[in-house]
Amino acid sequence: MRPHIEKIHATPHKAVVAVSGAGTQAVAWLLGVAGASRTVLEALVPYGRESMNSFLGFEPEQSASAQTAKDMARAAYRKAKSQLEDDSPAVGLACAATIATDRPKRGEHRAFVSAWDQDSSTTYSLILHKGLRDRAGEEELVSRLLVHALMLLSSLDSDVELGLTPGDSLEIDRTEHPSPLAQLLSGEAAWIVARAGVLEVEGTAPGALLPGSFSPVHQGHRGLAQAAREVLGTEVGFELSVTNVDKPALEEAEILKRLAQFTPEETVVLTRAETFFKKARLFSGRTFVVGWDTAVRIVAPRYYGDGFEDNQVAMLAALAEMWAGGTRFLVAGREDQGTFKTLSDVLIPPAFESLFSDVPESLFREDVSSTQLRAAEGN
């Protein structure tokens, strides 16, 4: 297998590989050839129930199935994306199998291999000729299939000899991913990054985010983003949640309309996170750039539940989790009923003052809002 593995290691693709039930030989092959660190970001063997549940984020209906392999490959792809340090293509490779063991099995010996990249997923469903091979023989066949799949995933031609017999059955299913917006609206994608007209599923978000509805984008948004860049010394992107606590989710046409307002140089992050607690969980370690009125809501217990005592505790727990995750808030002053209100007017619970910092009025003040602009336009 060495020549095949060497070809894989020579490509720029970065993989997270997850195998359960079979496929560990493929992992050993990949790691046993020089250059493995150029390909393998991480290798996992989520064999136990709790380990698999933790990896996927839910409990699969069946441990060895095409759907489980596909879910594993998708989770592996997401891990690969999160670990990239450059613009190399991320890929996820997974196997969910049940093969020969030290006790008789009533059902089929089968393995499902799934390969996932940004454009599509390919699932290989292998039913083995039961009784023809021992466990080592079945393990080798499944591992060869994994290497074959990784070669194709790495944009290589594959001439891996699988060693199939007439008693084996192999079916291959390739599925194109829905559009990025369709993935976001269905909940399949947690966020999308829009840069220069390109929508990237769960791409890297900027170090600071300025949330808003952007209906419409106005000089206040851009002025605050520029001021935040000067204060923080990092890129500031705009964040638009397509869901709202009190309103229906935005439709695709409306999302595209709002995106069209931004210039190619501006980064927009689309999410389904309608609360800052959810945003912070998606983007740990980020600074959120907000106005005074939004900061007031972040520390208002009524936004965290129904009963005051319960939501007071919920608010404090949420603030503590955000603080521990590195979330911070940069607060700009806003005019309220003729008075310019700043961070000093926000009643921040004791011990959480370090979550917040302010934008000096001398650096930014813009008494305009999207609501005012819509009212002026009669919308």
Image: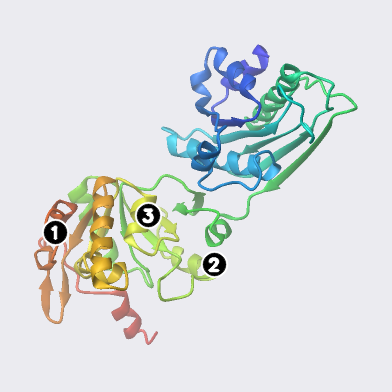
Say which mark, if any, is on residue 266: 3
Where 315 sits versus 190, above or below?
Answer: below
**Nearer the observer, 167 or 212:** 167
What's under tag 2, amino acid-wise?
Answer: Glu
Q: Position of residue 264 (x, y in %)?
A: 42, 54
Residue at 32% across, 73% down: 306
Q: Position of residue 153 (x, y in %)?
A: 64, 32
The residue that label 2 is drawn on is: 252
CA neighbours of label 3 inside 10 A, class few (<14), some (14 to 19), many (20+):
some
Judged from the image, the secondary structure of the residue bearing numbered disc 3 is loop
Does residue 26 appear to the left or right of 368 in the view shown? right
Q: Give me the residue at 57% from left, 35% from top.
A: 91
Tell me how far mark 3 sits from mark 1, CA to CA: 21 Å
Comes first in the chain, label 3 or label 1: 3
Residue 208 versus residue 68 in the image, above or below? below
Alpha carbon of mark 2 to alpha carbon of mark 3: how far?
20 Å
Which quadrant of the rendered structure holds the N terminus? top right
Callouts 2 and 3 close, C-beta under 8 Å? no
What secondary structure is found at the residue carrying circle 1? loop
Q: Is residue 259 left or right of residue 234?
A: right
Query: What colour-coding does the image apply?
Result: rainbow
Give the residue type at disc 3: Glu
Q: Residue at x 28, y 73 (%)?
A: 307
Q: In the rendering, which numbered label is found on residue 363?
A: 1
Q: Which residue is depicted at the point 57% across and 42% down? A: 74
Could you say which disc has been placed on residue 43 in the image?
none
